[in-house]
């Protein structure tokens, strides 16, 4: 005869785990999942960085004169791979070289060099040309997907925890009613 121990996650644990996952997912989508667009108008000597995501309306991050934008480049950093979960892969980010110093187009690093490289080439070509308008975008779609997965897992855990709590309350109610 084999004895097996059956573990059962309590509803309180599910509620806590669900709240944690839902909060992390929402924060990732809110803070890191935004699309960032750089738009420049040569006739106005103006550029602006605009951030948008599905939860908030478009928000202008920065406005600056086009003459302050000197170039764009892709910077890279190699992952250390020392800590658990850290990738040893190289990550890339598009940086705008301004008179005041470099500023990243967005806060997200990517393992795909193609999009930041294409955007940097478009910006540098625009600066060398006489084109009137420039618009380049870095999408936060992948980050939004990852954050949304965490959010949904959290909601499911919250739902399971709430159902477990309801079941426990109903059992307790029936038990108390039977004792009368």
Image: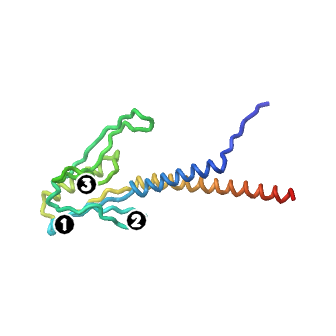
Q: Is residue 43 above or below residue 95?
A: below
Question: How many residues crowd around disc 2 within 10 Å: few (fewer than 14), some, or many (20 or more)?
Answer: few
Q: CA distance from mark 2 to mark 3?
A: 24 Å
Q: CA distance from mark 2 to mark 1?
A: 25 Å
Asked if residue 135 can be seen in this view, the reply is no
Q: Of discs 1 and 3, which sits in the foreground?
A: 1
Question: Which residue is located at x 53 percent, y 50 percent?
Answer: 20
Question: Which residue is located at x 52 percent, y 51 percent?
Answer: 21
Residue 50 in the image: state x and y as whole percent.
30, 63
Q: CA distance from mark 1 to mark 3?
A: 17 Å
Residue, disc 3: 119
Residue 126 in the image: state x and y as whole percent.
17, 59
Considering only order in the chain, which callout, 3 or 1, is on the residue closer to the N terminus? 1
Q: Nearer the viewer, residue 50 or 89?
A: 50
Residue 59 position by quadrant: bottom left
Considering only order in the chain, which callout, 1 or 2, is on the residue closer to the N terminus? 1
Q: Is residue 150 left or right of residue 91?
A: right
Verify CB contact (< 8 Å) between mark 1 and mark 3.
no
Q: Nearer the viewer, residue 45 or 137?
A: 45
Residue, disc 1: 41
Question: How many residues crowd around disc 3 within 10 Å: few (fewer than 14), some, or many (20 or more)?
Answer: many
Q: Mark number for residue 56?
A: 2
Question: Which residue is located at x 24 percent, y 52 percent?
Answer: 103
Asked if residue 170 can be seen in this view, the reply is yes
Q: What is the secondary structure assignment of the residue under circle 3?
A: helix
Considering only order in the chain, which callout, 3 or 2, is on the residue closer to the N terminus? 2
Question: How many residues crowd around disc 1 within 10 Å: few (fewer than 14), some, or many (20 or more)?
Answer: some
């Amino acid at each position: 005869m084999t004895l097996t121990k059956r573990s059962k996650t309590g509803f309180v644990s599910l509620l806590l785990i669900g709240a944690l996952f839902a909060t992390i997912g929402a924060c990732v989508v809110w803070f890191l999942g935004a699309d960032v667009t750089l738009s420049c108008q040569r006739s106005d000597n103006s550029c602006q960085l605009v951030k948008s995501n599905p939860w908030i309306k478009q928000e202008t991050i920065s406005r600056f004169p086009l003459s302050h934008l000197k170039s764009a480049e892709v910077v890279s950093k190699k992952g250390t791979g020392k800590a658990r979960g850290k990738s040893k892969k190289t990550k890339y980010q598009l940086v705008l070289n301004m008179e005041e110093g470099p500023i990243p187009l967005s806060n997200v690093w990517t393992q795909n060099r193609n999009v930041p490289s294409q955007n940097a080439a478009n910006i540098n070509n625009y600066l060398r040309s006489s084109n009137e308008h420039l618009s380049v975008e870095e999408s936060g779609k992948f980050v939004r997907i990852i954050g949304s997965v965490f959010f949904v897992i959290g909601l499911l855990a919250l739902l399971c925890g709430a159902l477990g709590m309801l079941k426990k309350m109903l059992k307790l109610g029936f038990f108390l009613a039977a004792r009368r």
